[in-house]
Image: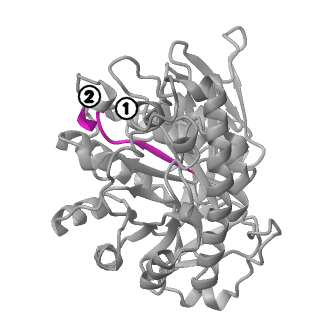
Amino acid sequence: MSMCADARSCLVLAAGTVFLATLLGATVSSDDQPRDDTVSDASCETNIYGAFRGPSSEHTLLHAQGKVLFPIGFYELPKDDAALKRMADAGVNFVRCGNRADLDRVQAAGMFGWLPLDLSQGATDDLRSQVNSVADNAALAVWEGPDEVVWNFTGASSLYRELGVHKKGGAWKRRDPEAVAYAEEQAKRIIPNMRAAAEMIRGIDKQDRPIWINEARDSDADYVRQYLGYIDITGCDIYPVKASERDVAQVGAAVRRWKEIGGGKAVWMVLQAFSWDELGDYYGAKTTVYPTFAESRFMAYDAIANGAAGILYWGSHYLKSDALRQSIYALASEINRLQPFLVGPDVQGVRTSLKPGGPASDAVKAMVRKADGDSMILLLNEDGNASFDVAVEGLSDLNGKSLYCLYTSETISLQQGRFSAHLGPLETKLYATDRKWESALREGRDFKN
């Protein structure tokens, strides 16, 4: 079982999602030829909600009230409207929905939804009916294909523990003959069905909404690439905080893997909003262990620094701790405050280097963006043991200006287009040229499990 596998495939997910807008990767049609993604300026101006294609095939944009926004999503749709409002007020903008009524609720809260569809059965009458029932709903932003579809016919522990398909646990990891044969058999049925289903959706959906499939971290790349031509967004789920380990830097490595697999597709990452013991006895966890605020913050920014185009949270519908919920809402509010930076391009010509004589490492990640006359610089250390002194250069346009390390008292005055920062193990530092980019929501930032 991967770090994230099975938790979503073996458990019933609560309906609910929300979304405003995002930069996505290149899209191709079902025949693997570039799709015509051109749209007039007029259509971008008149759409209040919904999806539109950008001026080139390199970007797909979701548009809301004249804005392009980074998706901050939840798989949980709260049953109570007050709880939904609390989620929306925190900056969550994208929620998983089950039907038209769910979409109407999230739209009333100022959010968007995505709808899960079982593409693995092909272009069925049931699928056609489901798509037709919501295709004209303004709150619908994205179609979601079957969750962890490749993992579920290759490495899922349920293939051994529940279905008896594998004779022994770990059969796929060892590539036991029966595991390989079963995977080949299922792929020959499922992947053509997914193509037919995607083609049906494209034919019905006049808004041409993107199709997204979330995989397990370790899903087989060869099988995934067999269906990538039919979808627009890829990525994986990863839940690394357990009683036995807290290797949160796995997130960045997972993003890098899925960016390589996706070959230019947008990558969305599904992160942890639960403790493993809350999922029941199946996983054998006995101790309640939640990500701290610092760990959740690191995982989100590790994903972003490595190129993730969206962040979503799974497991909150099992959550027993309102304190953890509040900490994730505080983080969502922080990320949402940075929207103009998160949807813009990287600033070119900025260089980072480690202090001479110090340890050599590729663990330090950096991202520099500009928006609304301000600059934002994200520095992050993926090493869980070593500290680094980092020099950031190529910022001559900021000479004489102050850089504020957000949510701390640290202030730096830039000289000669450079500054230095110390990064401790698994530390995240977020700098901006104005403190207005800090969120006012501070409750939950001190959560320590």
User: Would residue 270 be counted in the magenta stretch?
Assistant: yes
**Does the rendering let one see residue 133?**
yes
Position in image of residue 82 (x %, y %): 16, 66
Q: Residues within 10 Å of mark 2 (few under 14, many from 20)?
A: some
Q: Residue at x 60, y 29 (%)?
A: 172
Q: Which residue is mark 1?
A: 294
Q: Which residues are magenta?
A: 268-280
Q: Do the numbered discs 2 and 1 sit on residues whose CB atoms are within 8 Å?
A: yes
Say which mark, if any, is on residue 219: none
Q: Residue at x 70, y 84 (%)?
A: 39
Position in image of residue 152 (x %, y %): 52, 43
Q: CA distance from mark 2 to mark 1?
A: 8 Å
- Which residue sits furthest right? 33
Q: Quadrant of residue 421?
A: top right
**Does the rendering let one see residue 411?**
no
Query: What secondary structure is marked by label 1?
Result: helix
Q: Quadrant of the C terminus?
A: top left
User: Would residue 240 be counted in the magenta stretch?
Assistant: no
How many marks the image carries: the answer is: 2
Q: Which residue is mark 2?
A: 448
| 336 and 122: which is toward the camera | 122
| 141 and 332: which is toward the camera | 141
**Amino acid bearing label 2:** Lys
**Position of 203 relative to 71 (above/below):** below
| 163 and 8: which is toward the camera | 163
**Amino acid bearing label 1:** Ala
Q: Quadrant of residue 447?
A: top left
Q: Residue at x 59, y 60 (%)?
A: 343
